[in-house]
Every structure is written in structure tokens, then in C-alpha cells.
Amino acid sequence: MIRPAPRGILNGPTMAKLPTNSSRRDVDDFLRKVSDLPVRRTEGERGRLIFAMDATMSREPTWDHACAIQGEMFKETSALGGLDVQLVYYRGFGECRASRWVSDPRSLLRLMTGVACRAGHTQIGKVLAHALRETRKRKVNALVFVGDALEEDVDTLGQTAGELGLLGVPVFMFQEGNAGHVRQAFKEIARLSGGAYSPFDSGSAQQLRELLSAVAVYAAGGRRALVEFGRKHGGTAVPRLTGQIRRSE
């Protein structure tokens, strides 16, 4: 069970060296696929996004990266009615925590900079199970996960991912690194949930910013908002994205 993070605990950030196996085409393809995803949200409701990260020791540099760009998620969604974000992270010996829901970038940054990475095994199963519980209480529009490893049973994770898919919660899996077994597992989790997978690399500050912003826009305003996001930022990224993700409308 995920324990709520005490107020102010999120202090001392960090994230791992980004690999070089990604390309502009990977990002464009991801955005195009996300553009086909529907969002079922009651008019006037704020979007809700769970932002989950591996905070084990290897992720220090990437955590710092995410801290630097997380404000983009809020900036891109302000005109869509806003976005509420919950930070979930795991680290150390069985520690997996969820923050309160926050609605502005400064609050999220304070939470993230309160977290120091610690050695430990992956706990992706706890993250997915937490997302299930949260959306059963009140609709969650998307789950983002950023990590570089997987040390759990893939079939068990797939079962939970499928349940999230049935509840309309797509999981967006971002892989730091190029480990083949991690790639296959992350892709399967994304597929079963109706979400999408993308790698990111050492030159990926801009890539990660675009990817996170795109998912945030999707969570806040759905497919139309995401297409508009693509037009505003130029290029063919959003229109070209359609394959990984199943349509749920």
C-alpha cells in the first residue's frame, strides 16, 4: 500500500544519465499516437494526472531534469481548465509514497525537491495499484511513469495495467535507457492500459518537456486540445501519432 507523503517531505532531488537511443522521430511518433486518445471528463472538471517516478539511486540526474521542466505541464494546460497532479515515487526498502494533489507548478516543485533518491528495487506494481484506487475514488485522466528498470513479474503488472485500461486510465511509460527487457515490459503495460511508450535520451530535455506537456494537455482537454497543442508548437508531431494506442471511444 502506498503511504501518503508527509507534508514537506519531498526535499533533495536527483535523476540518471539519459541514454542516446531516442530520436526526434520517437517523440513525433509518440505524440501522434497520443493524439488519438479520448478523454472522458465532465465539463468544467479539472484534469487529474498521476506523475510517477522511480526514485532509486540510478535516477538522480533524471529527477533533477524533471524538476527543471515540470512547470511546463501546468503552463500548457492553464487555458484548458487546469490540471491537478499527484506525485508518486518509490525508493529504498519498500518505500512508495504519494503526495497530496496539487494544482500549481510551485507546489509540485516543492514536493519534488524534497525527495532524495535511494538505492532499492522497482515497485511499479504499487504505482499501478495506487492509480486504480485513486480513479475508483475520483476519475484519473492519465498516469505518467518515468523509470529505467523493472524487477517485477510482468504478467502481474499487465493484469493491473489492463484493469486501468478498462477504467479509461491510459498509462504513459517513459524509459530512460535502452534495456531490452524493460522496453518490452513498458510497451506491454502501455498497450494493455490503452496508453503509450517512449524512450528518451541524453539530449532529451526538450523531448521530455514535449512528452510530458503533451500528456498533460491530453489529461486536461482531450484529443482536440492535444491536436491544437501540436499545431501551436509546429511540426508534424501530433498528427503523425497513431498506432501504439487503442481508441477507447
Image (tube, rainbow, N blue to C red):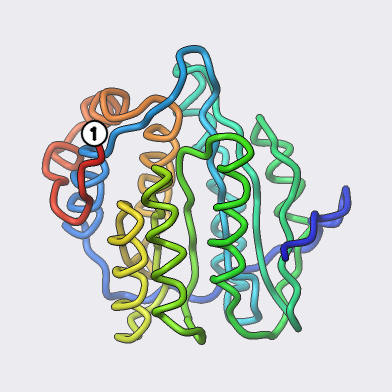
In depth, the one of 74 and 18 nearer the eye is 74
Q: Is residue 102 above or below residue 6?
A: above
Q: Is residue 189 above or below residue 249?
A: below
Q: Is residue 60 left or right of residue 214?
A: right
Q: Quadrant of residue 53?
A: bottom right
In depth, the one of 137 and 82 nearer the eye is 137
Q: Position of residue 71 (x, y in %)?
A: 57, 38
Label 1 packing within 10 angstroms: few (<14), some (14-19), many (20+): few
Q: Position of residue 211 (x, y in %)?
A: 36, 48
Residue at 55%, 52% (x, y): give it: 132
Residue at 21%, 49% (x, y): give it: 246
Q: In which quadrant of the rendered image does the N terminus lie? A: bottom right
Q: Is residue 118 above or below residue 64?
A: below
Q: Is residue 66 left or right of residue 246?
A: right
Q: Position of residue 217 (x, y in %)?
A: 40, 32
Mark 1: amino acid:
Glu
Q: How many marks?
A: 1
Q: In which quadrant of the rendered image does the C terminus lie? A: top left
Q: Quadrant of residue 60?
A: bottom right
Identify residue for label 1. Answer: 249
Q: Position of residue 93 (x, y in %)?
A: 76, 83
* Secondary structure of residue under mark 1: loop
Residue at 30%, 85% (x, y): give it: 180
Residue at 81%, 58% (x, y): give it: 11
